[in-house]
């Protein structure tokens, strides 16, 4: 299973935890929305749509930035389809799981003539591992977080995994 598919699975299994993490505050009611959007269906293996009380949270998990169509255009396309369907504010976050080569430009906007669409990018290698280590749903992401000592972080992840009770 690829990283982005694993993240999709985790975010769909624990939508409240992912929404709280990305939005920075606990969410009272979060539900997972279907990933097929109207018009010509676009299906992505790495997209999660969560509906909180007052907004849609669109999480796009990416291992690499190169795609066809390009990611900024896809984000605009998703936004348009989601807004048409739900008529709610939409927070779009691309979660980059692996750091791209240093020369790579990480785009956060689609802009052509008078059309401009912005979205956020969350880089896992810049995230603090503490919050991820303390939440079973986010624990698999902790190994991708910022650390000066990767071996020690992996040891912490392993220790947290060993504390998980069997279901």
Image (tube, rainbow, N blue to C red):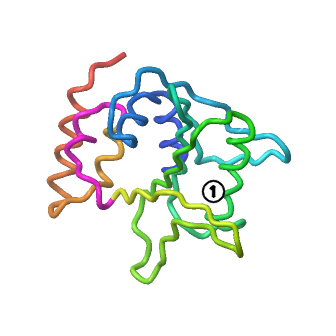
In the displayed structure, 162 sits above or below 123; it is: above
Picture coordinates of residue 100 (x, y %)?
44, 72
- What residue is drawn where x is 48% and y is 43%? 7
Q: Residues within 10 Å of mark 1 (few under 14, many from 20)?
A: many
Picture coordinates of residue 151 (x, y %)?
18, 57
Taking the view exactly as shown, the residue that stands out farthest to the right is: 40
In the displayed structure, 88 sits above or below 47; it is: above
Q: Nearer the viewer, residue 112 or 4?
A: 112
Q: In the visual, does 65 lie left or right of 140? A: right
- What residue is drawn where x is 21% and y is 35%? 160
Picture coordinates of residue 136 (x, y %)?
31, 31
Residue 163 image-quadrant placement: top left
- Residue numbers of the magenta segment: 125-137
Q: Which quarter of the image is occupied by the C terminus?
A: top left
Taking the view exactly as shown, the residue that stands out farthest to the front is: 114
Q: Which residue is mark 1?
A: 75
In the displayed structure, 104 sits above or below 19; it is: below
């Amino acid at each position: 299973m690829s990283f982005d598919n694993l993240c999709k699975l985790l975010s769909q299994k624990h939508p409240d935890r992912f929404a709280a993490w990305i939005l920075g505050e606990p969410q009272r009611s979060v539900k997972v929305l279907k990933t097929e959007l109207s018009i010509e269906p676009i299906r992505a293996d790495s997209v999660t749509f969560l509906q909180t009380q007052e907004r849609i949270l669109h999480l796009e998990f990416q291992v690499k930035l190169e795609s066809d169509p390009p990611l900024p255009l896809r984000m605009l396309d998703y936004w348009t389809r989601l807004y048409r369907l739900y008529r709610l504010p939409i927070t779009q976050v691309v979660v980059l799981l692996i750091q791209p080569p240093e020369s790579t430009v990480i785009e956060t906007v689609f802009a052509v003539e008078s059309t401009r669409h912005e979205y956020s990018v969350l880089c896992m290698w810049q995230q603090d591992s503490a919050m991820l280590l303390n939440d079973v749903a986010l624990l698999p992401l902790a190994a991708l977080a910022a650390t000066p000592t990767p071996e020690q972080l992996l040891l912490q992840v392993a220790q947290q995994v060993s504390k998980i009770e069997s279901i």
